[in-house]
């Protein structure tokens, strides 16, 4: 499971210090799969259109940009904004490949395939 949580850089370091103390005390360290996000970004990623994109990508190993546009009926500017946010937090990877006779096409690879995403907002 990957936890996506709002917080500041201080929250991240507090978590890291806690893990370091566990190591110093020879305790078993619990692996943490947490992505810390700015609160506004967390709220933006929870918008219905973006959660639909996350769900769409979840069980795919890769998908072409043009296919997402077509299947999710998104505009290029809207999809670009969504992908930019997911890329910022390393939830996806974007590469380009040659499309024989047609130029270059974007390939989107989700980095959370078959993982559960848990969102936490702490106020």
Image: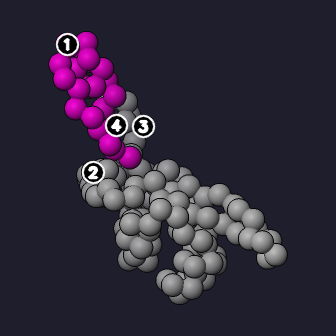
Q: Are marks 4 and 3 in contact (CB under 8 Å)?
A: yes
Q: Which is nearer the eye, 18 or 99?
A: 99
Say if mark 2 contacts mark 4, CB within 8 Å: no
What residue is shown at x 28% (from left), y 58% (from top)? 116
Q: Which residue is mark 4?
A: 11
The residue shown at (31%, 24%) is 17
Q: Is residue 25 visible?
A: yes
**Residue tagged 3:** 9
CB-based contact (under 8 Å), mark 3 and mark 2: no
Residue at image point 61% right, 72% down? 65
| Precedes in sequence: disc 1 or disc 4 | 4
Q: Is residue 17 above or below residue 111?
A: above
Question: Callout 2 environment at 10 Å: few (<14), some (14 to 19), or many (20+)?
Answer: few
Task: Note whether residue 44 is visible.
Answer: no
* Structural distance between the alpha carbons of marks 4 and 3: 5 Å
Left or right of 47? Residue 67 is right
SS at mark 2 in the image: loop
In this rendering, the label closer to the viewer, 1 or 3: 1
Percent of width and height locating residue 96 = 69, 61
Which residues, given as a range, are shown in magenta? Answer: 15-35
Q: Position of residue 27 (x, y in %)?
A: 17, 19
Which is in the foreground here, disc 2 or disc 4? 2
Distance CA(mark 1)–CA(mark 3): 24 Å
- Find numbered disc 1 in the image and state the secondary structure of the residue it sits on: loop
Q: Which residue was labeled with disc 1?
A: 25
Residue 16 appears left or right of 64:
left
Sequence-first disc among 2 and 4: 2
* Residue at numbered disc 2: 1
User: Measured from the top left, where is residue 31 in percent x and y?
Assistant: 27, 34
For the residues marked 3 and 2, what is the alpha-carbon distance in whole angstroms? 22 Å
């Amino acid at each position: 499971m990957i936890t996506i949580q709002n917080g500041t850089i201080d929250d991240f370091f507090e978590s890291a210090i806690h893990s370091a103390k566990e190591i110093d005390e020879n305790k078993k360290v619990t692996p943490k799969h947490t992505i810390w996000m700015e609160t506004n970004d967390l709220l933006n990623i929870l918008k219905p259109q973006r959660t639909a994109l996350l769900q769409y990508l979840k069980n795919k190993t890769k998908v072409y940009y043009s296919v997402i546009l077509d299947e999710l009926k998104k505009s290029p500017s809207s999809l670009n904004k969504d992908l930019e946010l997911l890329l910022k937090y390393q939830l996806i990877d974007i590469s380009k490949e040659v499309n024989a006779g047609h130029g270059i096409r974007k390939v989107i690879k989700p980095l959370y395939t078959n993982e559960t995403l848990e969102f936490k907002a702490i106020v």
